[in-house]
Image: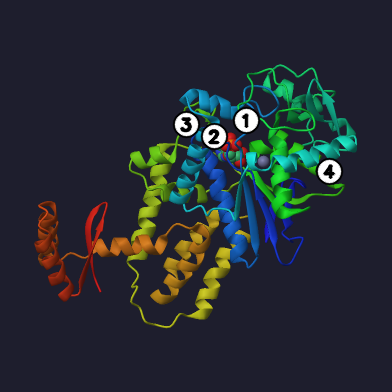
Amino acid sequence: MYLYNTLSHQKEEFVPNHPDVVKMYTCGPTVYHYAHIGNLRTYIMEDVLEKYLRYRGYPVKRVMNITDVGHLASDGDTGEDKMLKGAKRENKSVLDIAQFYTDAFFADCKKLNIKRPDVVEPATACIGEYIRIIEKLLDTGYAYLAGGNVYFDTAKLEKYYVFYDHDQEDLAVGVREGVEEDGNKRNKNDFVLWFTKSKFEDQALKWDSPWGVGYPGWHIECSGISMKHLGQDLDLHCGGIDNAFPHHTNEIAQSEAYLGHKWCKYWFHVHHLNTESGKMSKSKGEFLTVSLLEKKGYDPLTYRLFCLQSHYRRNLVFSWENLDNAAAAEERLLSRIAALDPADQSPVDQAALAALQARFTQAMDADLNTSLAVTALYDVLKAKTNDATKLAALADMDRVLSLDLLARAAARRETQETDPEIEGLVAQRTKAKQEKNWAEADRIRDELKARGIVVTDTPQGAKWRRV
Ligand code: AMP
Ligand code: ZN
């Protein structure tokens, strides 16, 4: 399997460090607001990567942090703490905000069939880890105290710009963000490991430390949480492309300075989802959510398919028209799957199945080419083989794509058959239920059952199928 590694700027064969575990770390959400569908594009593609590694037989252990402290309004060290901003906006405590938006994030993930990572750790739960790392960085001269804060000294590194070879001036945080520089810093790109003083309003959450009462910087949390759960090396680190600088650059700086050796082998970055008018951003306050998609009548899995139809290393433009195109493609796909016979008793043609799977793995092995993997689904439908084989191939690919293809096709099949007599009985039962005539409703259900019909109540009304 080949993956593009942002660190080497090229596609590389994926060879994990250890045979018994693939250590995968993901930067989690900053929980001061709902996740927008741009954030969720990143989590969908990371979910596909994790599931494909498992599909390929790798034993993955995946860890994700929840940023509930220390992420300031700029990705550098200036601006208000995002959590505090969220708490003020809603007149709640920081902890309440964190809990509410963490739950909301996982509810969105569930709707999008994004698996929960094996370990999910809030940043506020690992303060001791950060303190331990920072103490060693101070001891070894990689960090310094200034104006009450602890900073990482980027001048101590041989190479700081690991992902890009841009001009230092272009990347300097102060210049890039157009924000005031922090006069305590020895070098422009030095970053805060521990705050006891900020120019902005004080943090709500603070902890004791050898340098005074304060709170950790944003970058140290991912190094600390990763080392706590995955040890001294990582196979894969993922995030959105905006995380590459300064967040991941700083994670590498502090982790490798602390460990004294290379830390993470492969860096996987998902490019952005933009709207036609530009970048989608949580801090602007206007953004698209999964709930909004649902309100407009879209199944969240249609958005998942929309994301899968393009490559993760290309920017993707969201528009309602583009989503409608994905919905139309999904409709065609599901109705063709629904036309397959689920009761086909023929044996699965193993050779045909392997050939279909090979198309899928070829696409996915080539730097996770999900759009080609989606066309492999159509190849299955076109293949000259029996329905049992086609259904087996689709189920197999859907372990990774997670579009609920077979279940949704089955739901379609149930509603496709028409039989006026049975529909009449189902309607009578619905009426009896509305009138709270439970005895009559049960009697009709039993009558249908005797005819081999099972009725299921769904949010879209009663559905029936033959058993
Ligand atoms: P945040 O909650 O702001 O920390 O971001 C969560 C994740 O979403 C990070 O991995 C970001 O890199 C990623 N992200 C932010 N904006 C976008 C976007 N417009 N498209 C795709 N991913 C994004
Ligand atoms: Zn991170």
Q: Would residue 366 be visible to someone looking at this image?
A: no
Q: CA distance from mark 1 to mark 2?
A: 9 Å
Measuring from the top left, give residue 58's x and y in whole percent. Answer: 65, 65
Q: Residues within 10 Å of mark 4 (few under 14, many from 20)?
A: many
Residue under label 4, please give it. 258
Relative to 170, say whether 266 is above or below. Answer: below
Q: CA distance from mark 3 to mark 2?
A: 23 Å
Q: Mark 3: which amino acid?
A: Phe
Asked whether, in this view, residue 225 is left or right of residue 336, the answer is: right
Of callouts 3 and 1, the N-terminal one: 1
Tell me whether the residue at label 4 lies in contact with that at label 1, contact meaning CB atoms closer than 8 angstroms.
no
Measuring from the top left, give residue 51's x and y in whole percent. Answer: 57, 59
Residue under label 2, please give it. 95
Q: CA distance from mark 3 to mark 4?
A: 38 Å
Q: Secondary structure at mark 2?
A: helix
Q: Is mark 1 within 8 Å of ligand 1?
A: no
Of callouts 3 and 4, the N-terminal one: 4
Q: CA distance from mark 4 to mark 2?
A: 30 Å
Nearest to the eye among marks 4 and 2: give it: 2
Measuring from the top left, give residue 220's x and y in whole percent. Answer: 73, 38
> What's the mark number on residue 422?
none
Q: Mark 1: which amino acid?
A: Leu
Q: Secondary structure at mark 3?
A: loop
Residue under label 1, please give it. 205
